[in-house]
Amino acid sequence: MTRSRSSTICAAALASLALALAACGGDDEQPAQAAGGGKATVSVQDVDDVGAVLVDDGGAALYASEEESDGKIRCTASCLEFWMPLAAPGGGKPSAGEGVDAEVATVERPDGTMQVTYDGKPLYRFSEDAKPGQVTGDGLSDEFDGKSFTWHAATTDGDGGDSDGSGGGRTYGY
């Protein structure tokens, strides 16, 4: 009886571990889906000191990297620990909410998922933004896997943060 109880406990522990590993993913590509699980919608929200910021359907600020302004995906591997791609669920076409004045489309990521773009620039959420409408990643400079990135809040006027568009030039120490 004790042996079968131990086996049951071990099996349950292994199942829990497998679920935890699956949730964490063993894959470096883990795009963020639309919050409601449906179509990815990009809208505009006015944020103090930043302007008209693009947000996802849950109100999270969206960002773009200067190094991906040509639409080519460069944020992979360890970059994805902090910058989460906005994915088009099921590869479907994203929609543009009121105030979105440039093309909202998709680009294929290296893992084959489709990432939402705005005016050709891939869009990301920042892991350090704790609540909707918060914009803490604007103007950050990072280096991941030997690649440098400068991030700006995606805005309808093309600037990120500061009125001069520089975003403040802060460096984040990862």
Image (cartoon, rainbow, N blue to C red):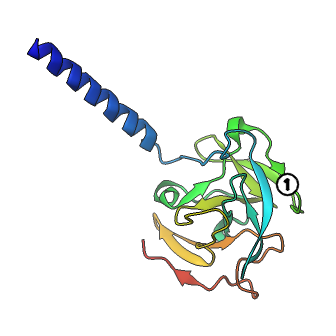
Q: Give the side of residue 74 with respect to residue 57, left or right.
A: left
- Foreground residue, 2 or 171? 2
Most extreme residue toward the left is 2
Q: Residue at x 63, y 40 (%)?
A: 112
The spot of residue 152 in percent (x, y) is 67, 73
The spot of residue 13 in percent (x, y) is 26, 30
Q: Give the side of residue 53 with respect to residue 169, left or right.
A: right
Q: Give the side of residue 23 with respect to residue 68, left or right.
A: left
The spot of residue 23 in percent (x, y) is 45, 40
Q: Residue at x 76, y 87 (%)?
A: 163
Question: To which quarter of the image does residue 48 belong?
Answer: bottom right
Q: Residue at x 58, y 42 (%)?
A: 111
Decide if residue 112 is in sight here.
yes
Q: Is residue 25 above or below residue 147?
A: above
Question: To which quarter of the image does residue 156 belong?
Answer: bottom right
Q: Which residue position is annotated with label 1?
A: 97
User: How would you rate the neighbour count of disc 1 (Cα within 10 Å): few for under 14, some for 14-19, many for 20 or more?
Assistant: some
Which amino acid, by three-letter code, is at mark 1?
Gly
Q: Give the side of residue 130 with respect to residue 123, left or right.
A: left
- Foreground residue, 60 or 102? 60
